[in-house]
Amino acid sequence: MKKALMLGALTIAVATLAGCATQVKSLPLAAAGGESGGGVPVYFGEQSHPAVKRDIGDVSYSVRIARKVSGPDDACREALAEGVSKLRAAARERSANAVIDVTTRFHSSESNSSREFTCGVSPSAAAIAVSGRLVLLEAN
């Protein structure tokens, strides 16, 4: 009897947790809007940019946002936008005029693409890590 109850409880727990898996997604940057606007240019991957006058340093931030009613792609875009906002804030604080070589990551899945970003999304949250180099670029 005890074994049957334990097996039943375990089955319910497994069935409940089966829908909680985190999905790793690669989404297009163009739809994210993270690479333009905001005052400080952000260059993903090996996107071309003016010559670097001075390297200020590396920065990295992790962002986790609660999913509201938005779909998984929208939640990932929102997490990316928050991460890019943190990169820009760090650039302003440290007198950089751009962030270059930006990469995105979720656990061991990393992207240094200039066209896509990587994000993890579950039924309850979206998460992303963004990293980049703060620099002072030559004026055009």
Image (spheres, rainbow, N blue to C red):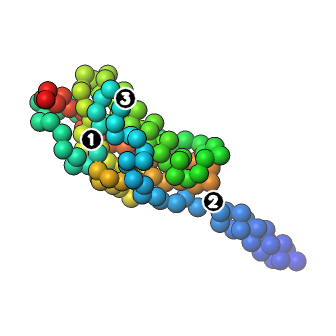
Q: Name which residue type carries label 1.
A: Tyr
Mark 3, Cα crowd under 10 Å, few <14 / some 14-19 / many 20+, is few
Seen at 37% across and 47% down, the residue is: 30
Q: Earlier in the sequence, mark 3 or mark 2?
A: 2
Q: Name which residue type carries label 3.
A: Gly
Q: Considering the numbered disc 2 on the image, is that residue within a helix, a strand or a loop? A: loop
Task: Measure the alpha-carbon separation of dots 1 and 3.
Answer: 13 Å
Quadrant location, the N terminus: bottom right
Residue 65 occupies quadrant: top right
Left or right: residue 82 versus residue 4 is left
In the rendered structure, find residue 34 and report the number of the disc placed on it. none
* Residue 60 seen from this side: no
Q: Nearer the viewer, mark 3 or mark 2?
A: 3
Q: Nearer the viewer, residue 102 or 2?
A: 102
Seen at 30% across and 29% down, the residue is: 40
Q: Earlier in the sequence, mark 1 or mark 3?
A: 3
In the rendered structure, find residue 43 and report the number of the disc placed on it. 1
Picture coordinates of residue 9, whole percent (x, y): 79, 68
Q: Nearer the viewer, mark 1 or mark 2?
A: 1
Residue for badge 3: 38
Seen at 58% across and 48% down, the residue is: 125
Q: Residue furthest right?
A: 1
Residue for badge 2: 20
Left or right: residue 93 versus residue 79 is left
Task: Measure the alpha-carbon separation of dots 1 and 2.
Answer: 33 Å
Q: Name which residue type carries label 2.
A: Cys
Seen at 32% across and 26% down, the residue is: 39
Residue 122 occupies quadrant: bottom right
